[in-house]
Image: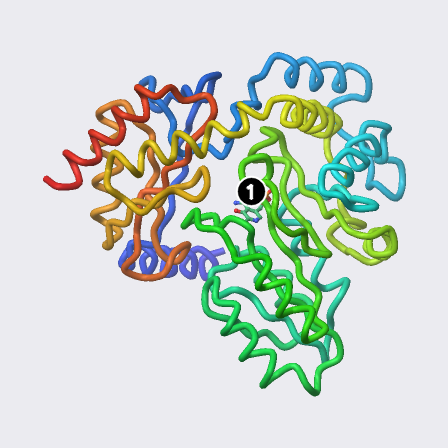
């Protein structure tokens, strides 16, 4: 135990020195973007509950019904006994929403990405990722054993150059990107990326974690994955694809097979949220409208999604700014390296249909005042 604790202690000290040590903060959450920390009421601009559905009465009622009917946990993996009825309804609705034949629900978005790439690529194959792809896309790529290359962020020309020089000599090739990037809020040029990938016989996986319901329309990738935990306000992940691909993943994605099925309440909540998302276009439009109101007020580049980065630079400055905003009643978490590249620490501001215009304006004005000072 001594050497173990000594190892952990040394590692922690190194993290501390690099301003990389993370600490958990207890955060309460309520409806209408309300949050509490240390007993203080805050307006949260850091939740990914973009449509404000996590507390919607219909969603909460669906979750309650599922708990009472199926129990608190799934009781087994999907392939054994954990495939309760709500899951197939959810998968059918997700597939229809994405215009695909079929869908597979995973335990989380992270688990989906951990399972998809290794099921489709392996040694001798090639995986090319946008350089800013989420950590779980990297994790899936590494687990696959395929050769990994990157292309410059959102640069379809660089993807073409990479595939042109490196595609030959590999069996299968996958291209991985995000429809909306989680820390920058910008959108991938999907039509261009899909066209390049097709030209080189590569299959595209797009991670729609931050786009679902917010940035709809545009071309679909053959592999559309995402999460149930952001705009759907619940928990879980999914892949929508052709029937053959979904059937293959059902038999081959290890992060699907060897883990307990999603809790029934999570699936039922996501299904109800998806229904509301489809019924209420005004709710879906609102996060982007508010994000644009914010970027206009601050003179920032126009928002492309519900996520707006306010770049600060050094990690400590971002932490200080976040703390000062918290003192004024706003929860806006600082994002630092290694989550983002060195020197690009930022406030990541997430807008929700639950925010009011006056809350958005008040936050913009506080940032203008504190960031300048
Ligand atoms: N992909 C992206 C782009 C994400 O931002 C996240 C979550 N932060 C995930 C996947 C993981 O999804 P989940 O939270 O459902 O595991």
Residue shown at 58%/28% (left/top)?
233
> Toward the viewer: 226 or 325?
226
Nearer to the camera, 306 or 148 = 306
User: Which residue is nearer to you in this view: 166 or 341?
Assistant: 166
Answer above or below: position of 48 versus 318: above
Please give left or right for residue 300 compared with residue 208 in the image.
left
Residue 276: horizontal and vertical position, in percent? Answer: 65, 22
Instruction: Please report the residue visible at 55 percent of the width from the left and 54 percent of the height from the top.
Output: 178
Residue 270 occupies which quadrant of the picture? top right
Beta carbon at label 1 within 8 Å of ligand 1: no
Q: Is residue 87 left or right of residue 23?
A: right
Q: Tell me the residue at 73%/52% (across/down).
A: 255
Q: For mark 1, give the secondary structure.
A: loop
Residue at figure coordinates x 75%, y 27% from the top left: 264
Residue tagged 1: 211
Q: Position of residue 82 (x, y in %)?
A: 84, 35
In the figure, 1 relative to 195: above or below? above
Residue 344: x %, y % from top left: 30, 56
Instruction: Name the image quarter holding the C terminus.
Output: top left
Residue 8's place in the image compared with 233, above or below, is below
Give residue 137's position: percent from left, percent from top: 59, 58
């Amino acid at each position: 135990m001594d050497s173990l604790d000594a190892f952990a202690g040394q590692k922690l000290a190194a993290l501390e020195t690099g301003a990389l040590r993370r600490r958990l903060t207890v955060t309460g959450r309520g409806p209408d973007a309300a949050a509490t920390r240390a007993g203080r009421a805050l307006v949260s601009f850091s939740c990914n509950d973009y449509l404000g559905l996590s507390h919607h009465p219909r969603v909460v009622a669906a979750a309650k019904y599922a708990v009472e009917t199926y129990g608190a946990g799934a009781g087994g993996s999907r392939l054994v006994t954990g495939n309760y009825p709500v899951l197939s309804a959810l998968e059918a609705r997700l597939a229809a929403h994405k215009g695909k034949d079929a869908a597979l629900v995973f335990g989380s978005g992270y688990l989906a990405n951990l399972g998809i790439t290794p099921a489709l690529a392996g040694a001798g194959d090639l995986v090319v990722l946008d350089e800013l792809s989420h950590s779980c896309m990297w994790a899936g790529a590494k687990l696959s054993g395929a050769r990994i290359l990157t292309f410059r962020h959102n640069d379809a020309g660089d993807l073409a150059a990479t595939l042109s020089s490196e595609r030959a000599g590999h069996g299968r090739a996958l291209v991985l990107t995000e429809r909306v990037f989680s820390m920058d809020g910008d959108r991938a040029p999907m039509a261009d990326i899909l066209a390049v990938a097709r030209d080189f016989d590569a299959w595209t996986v797009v991670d729609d974690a931050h786009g679902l319901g917010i940035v709809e329309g545009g071309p679909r990738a053959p592999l559309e994955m995402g999460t149930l935990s952001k705009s759907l306000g619940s928990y879980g992940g999914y892949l929508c694809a052709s029937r053959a691909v979904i059937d293959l993943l059902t038999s081959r994605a290890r992060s699907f097979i060897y883990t307990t099925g999603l809790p029934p309440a999570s699936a039922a909540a996501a299904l109800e949220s998806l229904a509301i998302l489809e019924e209420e276009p005004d709710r879906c439009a609102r996060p982007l409208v508010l994000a644009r109101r914010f970027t206009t007020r601050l003179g920032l580049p126009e928002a492309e999604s519900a996520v707006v980065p306010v770049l600060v630079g050094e990690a400590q400055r971002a932490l200080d700014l976040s703390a000062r905003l918290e003192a004024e009643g706003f929860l806006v978490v600082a994002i630092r390296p290694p989550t983002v590249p060195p020197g690009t620490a930022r406030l990541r501001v997430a807008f929700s249909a639950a925010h009011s215009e006056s809350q958005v304006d008040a936050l913009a004005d506080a940032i203008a005042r504190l960031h300048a000072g």
